[in-house]
Structures are given as C-alpha cells and as structure tokens.
Image (cartoon, helix red, strand yellow):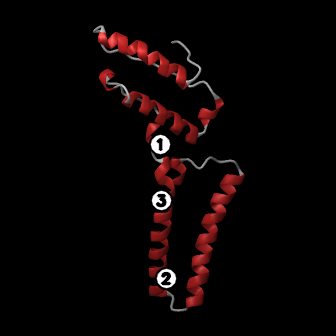
Amino acid sequence: MARISNLEGTIQQHNKLRQFVRAGIEPLLLHHGFLCDRVARMVQARALLGQWRKVADSYPELEVSVYEDAAKFLDLIPTMIPQTIQSSFLYSVMYVSRCLLFMTNPGALLVSNFAIFSTCIGVFGIQSLLGTLLDPIFMR
C-alpha cells in the first residue's frame, strides 16, 4: 500500500484512475490509511471523512464508496448537541410534571429540579476535567 501524505496528493492520483476506467479496467479496491495524530480526535476524523466523501462523489463514473469503521459514530457528531438539548428539555418537562403530582410546594419543586440539574452539570464537568472524551457512545 503506497503512503500518500495528504488528501491533495490522493486527489491528484484520481486522474490516473479515470484513465483506467476509460481503458476498461474492472473495479478495484483502494486502501488508504491516515497517519497523523490529529485523526485521534473525532471532529478531525469526521472532517477527513467528509473530504473523502466529496472526492468519491466527484467521480460518479468510478462508482466509489467510502468505508470507515467509525463512520456510524462520526455521523452522530452533528446531532449530539440538538439531541442533548431536546432530551434535557423533555426530561425536565416530565420531571416537573411528575413532581407537580406529588409536591404541592413550589419551593420543594425548585429545590428538587436544581438538584437534578446540578448533578448532571457536575457529572459532565468532572468527566471533562478528568480528560474523558465525551464521545457519542458516552453521550447517548
């Protein structure tokens, strides 16, 4: 497997692939590895996957497909914040409605809601201070 140091170098190689397709060469499999420390972060890995998908889409005659083991997790990154906000809001509404059934005192309701929210904020804060990556699996 040839090592290509960057994506631009790989894109230049696609012109050679087009010549093979025009010559009637049958389908082939191309493996490419990312050799850099930045890929360890999911956001950069998602950006690289997006670049590969754009390259694959620009060559429809090659019928290219891009496979990445972590793609199912990388595709969740843009939806994490809206899902977290939606889940938190719905959880709050359900918690308040249940508390209203059993607690008639508004002060007790405020204190109990504050306790739940501060616990959630504390857990995420401690996890980030300890350096735990808040990946899609952890957040779901």
Pair 1/3: label in front: 3
Pair 2/1: label in front: 1
Residue 140 is at least partly visible in this image: no
Give amino acid for label 2: Cys
Q: Quadrant of residue 9?
A: top right
Q: CA distance from mark 2 to mark 3?
A: 26 Å
According to the picture, the residue beneath numbered tag 2 turns out to be 99
Q: How many marks?
A: 3
Q: Secondary structure at mark 2?
A: helix
Report x, y in % for residue 72: 43, 40
Report x, y in % for residue 55: 43, 28
| Residue placed most toward the observer, 106 or 68 | 68
User: Is label 1 in contact with label 3 (beta carbons under 8 Å)?
Assistant: no
Q: Counting other residues with Cα less than 10 Å from the Cα at mark 1, is it few (<14), some (14-19), or many (20 or more)?
A: some
Judged from this view, the residue extending furthest toward the right is 129
What label sits on residue 82 in the rendered view?
3
Q: Quick check: 117 above or below 41?
A: below
